[in-house]
Image (spheres, rainbow, N blue to C red):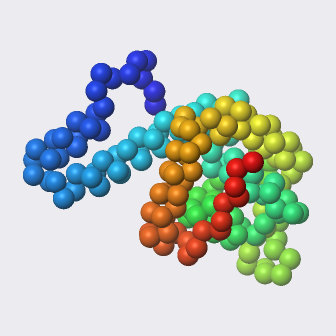
Amino acid sequence: MAFPRPLPTDPLAEAKRQWLAHGWSDAADGMTVVTSVMRAQQLLLSRVDAALKPFALSFARFEVLRLLAFSRTGRLPLSSVVARLQVHATTVTSTAERLVRDGLILREPHPHDGRAAMLALTEEGRALVERATTALNGEVFSNPGISSTDAADLVAIVARLRKNAGDFTEPRPQPDPL
């Protein structure tokens, strides 16, 4: 959600000022962190949505397709998709149903577990996710709106927040920039 012109002052700085003025100084920094991250998410999602619109993809649909395209065989158990995307199984199931309906993936029986399902990328799905990835790389990921140093710092800070929340146990080392 972008506005036609910048505001003359930062509304989040004003919110923090108000928090402090109301005696909530112990919560002011945390409120600012949460609202800043949520606003940043809105800004980035708006750019992602615009890049994916020509492909009729939401970011959730893109993530499922991209994850399948990254796999060696173009197929993964539904439970693996749920775990790797860190979303509720119902969300992945609903997203997968729409992708199946659109002919971008297939839902197949698991070869070893009769209760489980496999999601398999179709050739149409592979071609679409490659085009969508090119668009996202060019329109969003190659220039997220901050310097590469700030991006690395932000990723490290958010990784600590995620780790402290129990999102994962230990991050894999990031490769050095080329």
The residue at the point 54 percent across, 54 percent down is 155
Is residue 70 visible from the viewing direction of this image?
Answer: yes
Across and down, in percent, residue 82 comes to: 64, 66
**Number of numbered tags placed on the structure image:** 0
Pick whichever, 79 or 174, lies toward us: 174
Where residue 154 sits: x, y (%)?
50, 51
Question: In this rendering, would 163 be left or right of 12?
Answer: right
| Lateral position of residue 42 relative to residue 49, left or right | left
* Image location (x, y in percent) of residue 26: 18, 59
Q: Using residue 24 as the reference point, say whether residue 60 is left or right of it.
A: right
Q: Residue shown at 45%/27% (left/top)? A: 2
Picture quarter containing residue 96? bottom right
- Residue 103 in sight from this viewpoint: no
Relative to 109, residue 39 above or below: above
Up-down relation of residue 145 to residue 175 (above or below)? above
Looking at the image, which is closer to me, 11 or 171? Answer: 171
- Name the one closer to the observer, 28 or 48: 28
Q: Residue at x 77, y 37 (%)?
A: 134
The residue at 89%/48% (across/down) is: 123
Q: Dividing the picture into quarters, in which one does residue 119 lie?
A: bottom right
Q: Residue furthest top?
A: 4
Residue 108 at x, y percent in the picture: 82, 65
